[in-house]
């Protein structure tokens, strides 16, 4: 992942007993994180065909449901941990360019776009300080491992007409990669009661 600025919204409920805190939290993160870029070039000697693939994968938004456990080290300061499932919405854009030179240069291109959601496990930790009875600020770090992101890439040409590749006729294979996110948040929380 590249570094980028994200924004989000949390909604939760918690209870404290003595110095211990337990709560649940729903979270939505709105982002446009660039996950990965890759390219490959395939050469087919029998048809003098060159296939160039380019793939860009972007993480659009994330949603999570978390368990929050903490300890009140001081009356106004909470150290806490987070754990729970998180779902990410990924978009993969790919393009394949078919090039051939048999006396005349010929080029044809196809483009594909796919999107899907993937689940991961979020682990996090933070410190929160109550500024007033209703308002607090927090510094939080989280890590998410996503299971698998699928994206298409060409493996070979499929149809050759008059010595030239037919656009959109490539043999496509689905590939996959694993993704991780590491986030640092500065949060402002408002307590309704």
Image (tube, grey):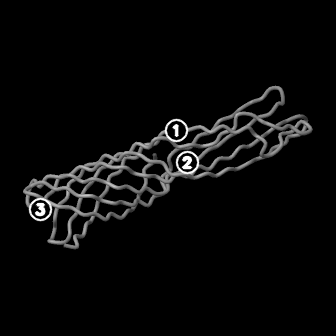
Which residue is under mark 3?
Answer: 76
The CA span between labels 3 and 1 is: 43 Å
Q: Earlier in the sequence, mark 2 or mark 3?
A: 2
> Which numbered circle lies on residue 129?
none
Location of residue 38 (image quadrant): top right
- The residue carrying pointer 1 sits among few (fewer than 14), some (14 to 19) or many (20 or more) residues within 10 Å by Cα, namely few
Q: Is residue 76 above or below residue 101?
A: below
The nearer-to-camera label among 2 and 1 is: 1
- The residue carrying pointer 2 sits among few (fewer than 14), some (14 to 19) or many (20 or more) residues within 10 Å by Cα, namely many
Q: Residue at x 22, y 63 (%)?
A: 137
Q: Nearer the viewer, residue 35 or 79?
A: 79
Secondary structure type for disc 2 = strand
Location of residue 5 (image quadrant): bottom left
Q: Is residue 146 left or right of 66 when viewed as pictured?
A: right
Proximity of marks 3 and 1: CB atoms separated by less than 8 Å: no
Measuring from the top left, give residue 1's x and y in whole percent: 46, 45
Q: Residue at x 74, y 34 (%)?
A: 156
> Which numbered circle lies on residue 57?
2
The CA span between labels 2 and 3 is: 42 Å
> Which numbered circle lies on residue 177?
1
Secondary structure type for disc 3 = loop
Q: Earlier in the sequence, mark 2 or mark 1?
A: 2
Proximity of marks 2 and 1: CB atoms separated by less than 8 Å: yes
Q: Earlier in the sequence, mark 3 or mark 1?
A: 3
Measuring from the top left, give residue 17's x and y in whole percent: 10, 58
């Amino acid at each position: 992942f590249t570094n980028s600025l994200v924004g989000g919204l949390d909604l939760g409920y918690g209870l404290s007993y003595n110095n211990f805190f337990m709560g649940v939290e729903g979270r939505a993160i709105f982002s446009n994180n660039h996950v990965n870029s890759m390219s490959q070039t395939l050469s087919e000697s029998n048809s003098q065909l060159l296939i160039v693939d380019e793939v860009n994968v972007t993480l659009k938004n994330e949603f999570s449901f978390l368990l929050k456990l903490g300890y009140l080290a001081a009356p106004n300061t909470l150290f806490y941990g987070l754990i729970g499932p998180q779902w990410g919405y990924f978009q993969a854009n790919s393009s394949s360019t078919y090039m051939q030179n048999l006396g005349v240069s010929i080029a044809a291109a196809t483009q594909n776009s796919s999107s899907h959601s993937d689940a991961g496990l979020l682990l996090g930790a933070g410190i929160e300080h109550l500024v007033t009875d209703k308002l607090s600020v927090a510094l939080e770090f989280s890590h998410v491992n996503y299971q698998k992101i699928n994206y298409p890439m060409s493996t070979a040409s499929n149809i050759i007409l008059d010595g030239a590749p037919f656009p959109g006729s490539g043999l496509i294979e689905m590939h996959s990669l694993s993704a991780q996110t590491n986030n640092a948040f500065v949060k402002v929380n408002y307590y309704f009661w």
